[in-house]
Image: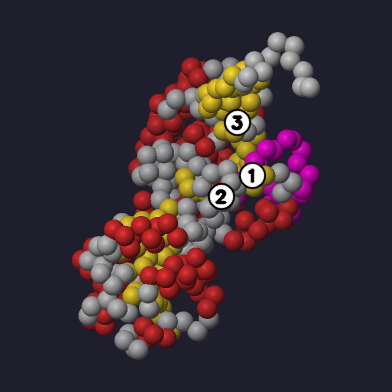
Amino acid sequence: MKLIKEELKNKVLESMMEIIDKNRKDLLYANKMDLDAFNKDDQALYDRLVVDDSKIDEMIKAINEVKSQNDPVNAEISKNELDSGLKIINKTAPFGTIMIIYESRPDVTIEAAVLAFKANNKILLKGGKEAYHSNKILVKFWHQALQENGLEKDWIKMLEMNREETQAFLKNPTEPIDLIVPRGDERLIQFVKENATCAVLVSGRGNNFLYIAEDANWKKTLEVIINAKTDKISGCNALDKVLIDINLPNYEAKLKELKEVLEASKVEILVDSEVKKVLASSEEITDSNIWYEEFLALKIAIGAVESLEDAISKINKYSGGHSSAILTENAGTAAHFMENIDSAAVYHNASTRFTDGGQMGVGAELAISTDKLHHRGPLGLKQLVTNKYYVYGDGHVRI
């Protein structure tokens, strides 16, 4: 794939920012068409779909942040000269063509494209039908920015396919694809894994857990839980499950206070059989599959555990591997928890809502990867490259 100079990439991004800003009304109108056609019963999906002036400002900011970052391509990773005289340099290189499949969020059409393009990758955007008009106009803006700077439109392409057509495309792509990133629920991820013929990097579900240790500061605990649960229910970094240590001083009183605080924020509460003994009026969990579920709603499940090890075991069994938190005043306890929890991000005395590219200093993100190869966590600009070895000899042959 032809490498584009950083100066030209940045000119494209500058054009894109100007185009979005000048055409706000057209974008808002397109988004209104999507919103009017959407079934508002799914509040989380609806929230992700909304574009307003604030969201447009965020889009422009995301492009500008990527523009200000150094070009990640051709950066030297290592350099060695062997005893044989061979010189070996390992450098970053583009993936080639990335396909992203996502639901509802028009801002992904901005963040995915800007990151892929700055990292010298082509990108195929397969957004959900619910955001069709919003995505369509944003890709139109991208094409205008590319053409204004003498580049072909095919660097950024919107795929307009139904489920059957997408399945056929994944099995027999009509153009080379080097990496697919599915952003969505378990069904989407499984669909892509079953049908793709190239590498798949999973942006998995949330289903994030928080463990309240026996020495947790209760004021911090309540503040963190409310923020993690209610700040943005549609976020994959929202909190879904709370495990409370039965050895917590004033355990029953604190459970009752937690219920009051959650209900004041209109959060529906589900409880296990042990917590039910204290919170008798709360709905009891009768299906263990609830512990695997990502809610994306004002709903939370609370369970009791007998120890730190009990909490670690339960989290590693049920969580989505996205984000997990511990509330404790003991640094050693926190370290043990964080080292043994199998999640992309682990927290000590902090809300899971920080698992986000911008919040973690990465900038715009393509997704939050819950895979372990080639990267885990926010996929920012530096993570959208692979590597290549450059080997220099002088007639060298292997004997």
Give above or below for 203 relative to 20. Answer: below
Kindly identify the residue that appears in the image at 43 percent across and 73 percent down.
310
Q: Which residue is mark 2?
A: 372
Three-letter amino acid code of the residue under disc 2: Lys
Q: Mark 1–mark 3 contact, CB under 8 Å?
A: no
Q: Which mark is residue 387?
A: 3
Three-letter amino acid code of the residue under disc 3: Asn
Kindly identify the residue that appears in the image at 64 percent across and 15 percent down.
85
Q: Is 314 positioned to the left or the right of 192 in the image?
A: left
Start-end of magenta stretch: 159-183
Residue 213 coordinates in the image, percent (x, y): 31, 69
Residue 92 coordinates in the image, percent (x, y): 56, 28
Q: Which residue is mark 1?
A: 180
Q: Is 222 positioned to the left or the right of 387 in the image?
A: left
**Closer mark to the observer between disc 1 and disc 3:** 3
Q: CA distance from mark 2 to mark 3?
A: 17 Å
Residue 164 on the magenta segment:
yes
Q: Mark 2–mark 3 contact, CB under 8 Å?
A: no
Kindly identify the residue that appears in the image at 62 percent across and 38 percent down.
98
Q: Mark 2–mark 1 contact, CB under 8 Å?
A: no
Disc 3 packing (10 Å; few <14; some 14–19; many ≥20) = some
